[in-house]
Amino acid sequence: MNAVRILVCFKVTPDYEALREADWVAGEGGGAHGSGAAGGGTGAASRVETRYVPRILDCFDESALEMALRMREAAAGGTVPVELGAISIGGKEVERHLKTLQALGYERVTRVDTDADLDFAPTVTASIIARYVENTNNTDLLMLGWRSGPHDGGTVPFLVAEELGWPCLTQVTEVVVLSSDRVRVAHVVDDGVLRVTVRLPCVLGVGNAVVARLRVPTLTDRLAQRGAPVERVQGGDLGIDVAAELAREASVLADLEVIRRDRPGVIVGGESPREKAQTLFDSCLKSMIEKL
Amino acid sequence: MSLRRATIVEGLQHILGADSVVTDERILKESSIDRFRMFEDIHGVYTQPIPAAVAMARSTEQVAGVLRFANEHGINVVARTGRTATEGGLETAVPDSVVLDGSGMNQILAIDAYNMQATCQCGVPLQVLEDRVREHGLTTGHSPQSKPLAHMGGLTATRSIGQLSTLYGGIEDMIVGLEAVFPDGTVTRIKNVPRRAVGPDIRHVIIGNEGTLCYITEVTVKLFPYLPENNIFLGYTVDTMKTGFEVLREVMVNGYRPSVARLYDPADGAYHFAHFVPEGLSVLIFVAEGPAGIAKATAEGIEAIVAQHPECRQVESRYISTWFADLNWGPDKIAREREDILQTGNINRTTEVSGDWGCINDIYENALRRIIEEIPDITMAGGHSSHSYINGTNMYFNYFYNVVDCGPEEEVTKYHTPINRIICEETLRYGGAIVHHHGLGKARTPWVRDEYGSSYYILEGLKRAFDPKGIMNKGTIIPA
């Protein structure tokens, strides 16, 4: 039986939750303290300054990476072997995540080496991924988070699928390997969850899956994989001039506005819990129920 | 003869009123533990004896009433306020204990900006007090990571310390006076004075008692000018921990008092600083604060000392200020942690100890080596020093492990306690202290006699004198 070859694309993003409110500033040298290069890479002078916050795995990509591991485990008891690969586009910050994936059992890990800021460049990102898949010709199922961070419009899975000519499903929450050329996919649609059987190859954009966290390898696991090679690829190896492509897709972050969702808190008074509950009901809940 | 559970509840209701006595089963189960058994809690498994009730006290008189009742009938009492304890101090080791909760005693009683002190009840969250005194341009100077959650009573009872301790000290340096209730209902007040020499400093009978001697109902703490605009953040990479400890020592010995003086090893540092620190390097962090002249002089003094160590390389200060702004733990991070643990089975634990400059690196190296060699399923083991003194510093061991091949109820015995044992053994071997600022709780009581040595006599004497019937938090500090 042929193996199902899964390739998971993941992105290492700034931890936007660690960004101070004062640092959400658009413009050259962004940030309250002003410090030159912005956006965590080159050619991004109009970005929010993010290089001072830690880098984390994009949460949807993290789901995809764990789902792939579980798909292999679930398939291991059957007759379908599953091979796992992972690819990320970025600089040195990607490396430690690739090593973690090796320790977790990913056989092939690849870094498309670039310091270019691709945050607002979905077509360039999609082209890189699609060219890699075409050039290596060893992927049956491509999985990636449906979006990565506040700058991402969620278009990359569709663009990759279009370039490859493969079908695409997004908002995927569960995948089961059925055979060497079929997977069962659950994905969220407007009025519920749709379960479909998909013939491979295909692209899956992972959404709010129950499986949301990537497992953690032990130090022993890491030691066993120490020295295992990480494949490094340049844009040129894929026939892509990243800088030129990026120039064509240039975007400028013009402005940012804080959306305040704070609501005032009210402490409900009363001598007893019963009295407080009654006050809460009378002053708030009753009118809400009546509107239903 | 011990009372039946229903009789205990009736007695508490008589003292506090029915609405202030909680007997909901789920709440009782959650009240039988603290974060020491969070893995069990996350999985809904509770192995400790379930308390009879949670008694919500609203006044010192009510605390006294509950303690008198418990003392008369031999009922174990566990004192709590903010519930952020990490070492098992809030576990109800005895069936039908009473959890005496002071979180409702949440009034700030006075902010005296002239005499630079604030008085509050035990259930005031530190964050609330800090926010209020900042309206006066002041700060408590106390900033543990638990600041958004922890209450003043618990912080005092566990001898807590904050991230700015190298300048402001631990809670024991901040407490001016306090009020506490002893098991027989005696209410004691220690007045607020700058200093006095009228015999032993009896504040220290109360500070750090972890609910084993008395119940803290009110505290008065010092205040300081809040001058964040003068803060200077300094960060350096350093090749070895040994050099890092030496830099810390020189900064302290030369008389500088940065509010923050930290040294992270490569493993622990990678969790915070991988975006700017190359793999394998340790990280030194300093924050100089106070009046502008002092902050500037402190920063310049530190820079001059670091310059004597060529292997230290400075990083942009904004990396440090950004990191520092995201340190504290609020409900959002607690919720995220629970979800992480539930999904991955990977849990983060810490053990903090201290030692003098001559031994701290040996404690660090030996304990870490043994943890990695002897404990299965470790996914990260490292640590940092975060509180320094003229004669030594602390070591905050930080480690993660995957809980595998055992039930939630075995996590503590399979992993956490053996790691604690290694760290305590190595710390004692080199003459350090087995707990720096979390409190002993119940987790590290197996080593308390070795920790105290001949001075254990004093500890036992305090327990006999103030809690002769042994009703106060059985099993905490003094083994059951």
Image (spheres, coloured by chain):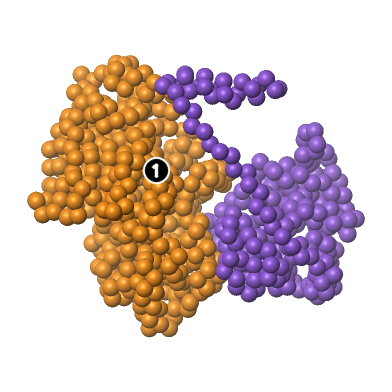
Q: Which residue is mark 1?
A: B125
Chain in orange, by letter, is B
Q: Residue at x 36, y 18 (%)?
A: B18
Answer with the quarter of the image where residue B189 lies.
Answer: top left
Task: In this rendered view, identify the residue nearer to me: B182 or A71.
Answer: B182
Residue A18 higher or lower than B97, as above or below: below
Q: Position of residue B411 (x, y in %)?
A: 44, 43
Q: Residue at x 17, y 55 (%)?
A: B195
Type of amino acid at the residue the image marks with label 1: Pro
Residue B327 higher or lower than B298, as above or below: above
Q: Residue at x 59, y 25 (%)?
A: A284
Chain in purple, by letter, is A
**Is residue B195 something one can see in this rendering?**
yes
Q: Residue at x 59, y 43 (%)?
A: A262
Relative horizontal placement of residue B126, taking residue B356 as reference (left or right):
right
Element on which disc 1 rests: loop
Identify the residue at the far left of this view. Answer: B199
Q: Position of residue B386 (x, y in %)?
A: 37, 62
Q: Position of residue B236 (x, y in %)?
A: 46, 74
